[in-house]
């Protein structure tokens, strides 16, 4: 762990510096291209002042992360899949950001999910084939292998379901995390800050894992540095928004990092804020459709607290605190479950 420490710090600091240096001209470019965010009228009234703030800031994050992963020679089997998801889902998000800026409407939710699912299936199959995952690791329980089989009708063949079940879990994790982070990206600095704590948690897990995954940890460090640089311009009042190009892609990438580290079962804890935001939205929609009543003042959850009288900065900072504590607890569970040598 110590021998790689300097490289991790260099990657983090260089990613921060690249984003801080490149973001001002990039913001001017977004202004020139007319990439201003269209704010929903049904949202909190206080957000209307943000109309026209440049969106698609995530494209610069994606570019810096991919470039530095190559410069630091961090490309290997443990990082190919996270970076592929970052690029492909980032492309989907960029199209959505462009359409929102031009028309006020982005890609429909179901169409996004189709693309996310296609990418997730391809990545899940690669991860399963390469690493041979046929189960998951559960804190205090250890490795749980899926060993059941399915008989193929009218033949003598049977199919092991371990690989199939892992792929199903992987696809669900990637799509859920991608959309959870996207729902969280509704306040200045909210998604970025919580992503920093989540990636720091998996950076620590990658270093403490057996075997250690230094390149995966290095990519996490680069992501953390890039997001911190982005937050320099995204904290309230935001000069640029991450947009779907950043939120969808970084959420999906986080899930793949969790899968490759073998710790996808603690992702809901490390990404607790993303889970709560997504759950609040699901509950709100479901309650309104079934009972014609709302559970929250407004969903996702951060809007509920806003309309309850909390300032935007207070909501963001308190969600950051919860995200940091959840990440620490997730790492603690992982460390507590490492078998003694």
Image: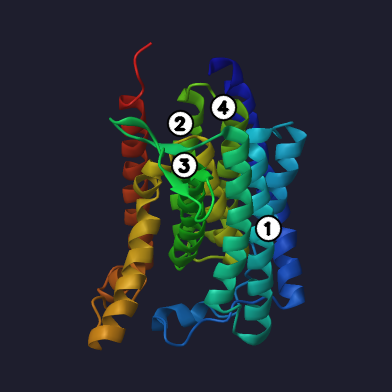
Question: Residue 235, image x and y in percent?
Answer: 50, 59
In the image, residue 306 sits, relative to residue 14, either above or below, namely below
Q: Distance between the residues labelled 4 and 3?
A: 24 Å
Left or right of 255 on screen, residue 146: left
- SS label for mark 4: loop
Q: Mark 1 points at which residue?
A: 88
Label located before the other in sequence (4 or 3): 3
Can the viewer see residue 44? yes
Question: Residue 157, image x and y in percent?
Answer: 54, 45
Q: Mark 3 points at which residue?
A: 162
Binning the other alpha carbons within 10 Å of mark 2 as few (below 14), some (14 to 19) or many (20 upward) gives many
Dots 4, 3 in contact, CB < 8 A: no
Q: Name the residue under label 2.
A: 205
Label located before the other in sequence (1 or 3): 1
- SS label for mark 3: helix
Residue ID at (46%, 87%): 41
In the image, residue 53 sits, relative to residue 150, either above or below, namely below
Can the viewer see residue 332? no
Q: How far apart are marks 1 and 2 (CA)?
A: 25 Å
Q: Distance between the residues labelled 1 and 4?
A: 23 Å
Closer to the camera in the image, 196 or 335: 335
Q: How far apart are marks 3 and 2 (CA)?
A: 24 Å
Instruction: Identify the mark at residue 213; answer none if there is no mark.
Output: 4
Q: Which residue lies furthest to the top in this view?
A: 341
**Which quadrant, please, contains the C terminus?**
top left
Binning the other alpha carbons within 10 Å of mark 3 as few (below 14), some (14 to 19) or many (20 upward) gives some
Question: Residue 328, image x and y in percent?
Answer: 34, 37
């Amino acid at each position: 762990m110590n021998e790689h420490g300097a490289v991790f710090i260099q990657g983090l600091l260089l990613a921060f510096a690249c984003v801080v240096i490149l973001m001002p001209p990039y913001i001017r470019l977004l202004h020139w291209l007319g990439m201003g965010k269209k704010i929903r009228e049904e949202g909190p009234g206080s957000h209307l002042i943000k109309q026209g703030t440049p969106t698609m800031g995530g494209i610069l994050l994606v570019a810096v992360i991919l470039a530095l992963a190559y410069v630091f020679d961090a490309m290997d089997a443990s990082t190919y899949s996270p970076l592929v998801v970052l690029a492909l889902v980032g492309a989907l998000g960029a199209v959505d950001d462009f359409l929102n800026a031009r028309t006020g409407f982005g890609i429909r939710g179901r169409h996004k999910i189709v693309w996310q699912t296609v990418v997730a299936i391809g990545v899940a199959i690669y991860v399963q084939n390469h690493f041979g995952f046929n189960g998951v690791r559960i804190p205090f329980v250890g490795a749980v292998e899926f060993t059941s089989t399915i008989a193929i009708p009218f033949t003598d063949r049977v199919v092991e379901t371990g690989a199939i079940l892992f792929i199903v879990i992987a696809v669900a994790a990637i799509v859920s995390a991608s959309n959870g982070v996207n729902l969280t990206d509704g306040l200045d600095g909210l998604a970025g800050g919580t992503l920093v704590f989540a990636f720091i948690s998996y950076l620590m897990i990658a270093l403490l894992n057996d075997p250690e995954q230094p390149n995966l940890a290095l990519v996490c460090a680069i992501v953390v540095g890039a997001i911190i640089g982005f937050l320099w311009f995204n904290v309230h009042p935001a000069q640029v928004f991450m947009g779907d190009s950043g939120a969808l892609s970084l959420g999906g990438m986080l899930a793949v990092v969790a899968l490759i580290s073998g710790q996808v079962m603690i992702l809901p804890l490390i990404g607790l804020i993303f889970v709560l935001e997504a759950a609040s939205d699901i509950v709100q929609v479901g309650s309104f459709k079934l009972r014609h009543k709302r559970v929250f003042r407004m969903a996702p959850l951060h809007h509920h607290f806003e309309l309850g009288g909390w300032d935007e900065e207070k909501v963001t900072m308190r969600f950051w605190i919860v995200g940091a504590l959840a990440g620490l607890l997730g790492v603690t569970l992982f460390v507590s479950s490492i078998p003694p040598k």
